[in-house]
Amino acid sequence: QVQLVESGGGLVQAGGSLRLSCAASGSILTINAMGWYRQAPGKQRELVATIASGASTNYADSVKGRFTISRDNAKNTVYLQMNSLKPEDTGVYYCNGDVRTWLTSRRDYWGQGTQVTVSS
């Protein structure tokens, strides 16, 4: 069993910053790509940023230059530094991991989500 637990969400004014963390735990053998997705009210879940095991990154156009994704492989943790936040960044942010365990082949795991609210 694998668990992904997010933290770091909250309420911030436009222009402010937040840092999200997501720690994976359980019978982990390897973690390949990890990423952050978000879902605004009434909208579909969308990709924010991903980071491969080799640290190559990919960002949604809407967050390029403002958000930075990073990971600490020793801690099985992925981070999302969010700067210059805008009201349109508001939503529930979900962590995702492509994980292989000692008992199963690779599959996607999701965290429970953390709320980010940016006030204007």
Image (spheres, rainbow, N blue to C red):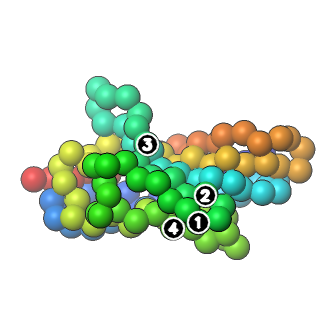
Residue 105 vertical placement versus 26 (above, below): above
Q: Residue at x 51, y 67 (%)?
A: 70
Residue 97 vertical placement versus 40 (above, below): below
**Quadrant of the frame with the N terminus:** top right
Residue 95 locus on image (x, y percent): 52, 49
- Is disc 3 surrounded by few (<14), some (14 to 19) or many (20+) residues within 10 Å? some
What is the CA distance from the residue labelled 2 to the residue labelled 4?
A: 10 Å
Marks 4 and 1: in contact by CB < 8 Å? no
Q: Nearer the viewer, mark 2 or mark 3?
A: 2
On the question of residue 10 being in view, the answer is no
Residue at mark 1: 55
Residue at mark 2: 52
- Is disc 1 surrounded by few (<14), some (14 to 19) or many (20+) residues within 10 Å? some
Q: Residue at x 15, y 59 (%)?
A: 14
- Is disc 4 surrounded by few (<14), some (14 to 19) or many (20+) residues within 10 Å? many
Residue 72 locus on image (x, y percent): 61, 71
Residue at mark 4: 70
Marks 1 and 2: in contact by CB < 8 Å? yes
The disc, 3 or 1, on the residue closer to the chain's N-terminal end is 3
Q: Amino acid at mark 4?
A: Ser
Q: Quadrant of residue 32?
A: bottom right
Marks 4 and 2: in contact by CB < 8 Å? no
Q: Amino acid at mark 2?
A: Ala
Residue at mark 3: 47
Q: Quadrant of residue 64?
A: bottom left
Q: Amino acid at mark 3?
A: Leu
Q: Nearer the viewer, mark 1 or mark 4?
A: 1
The disc, 1 or 4, on the residue closer to the chain's N-terminal end is 1
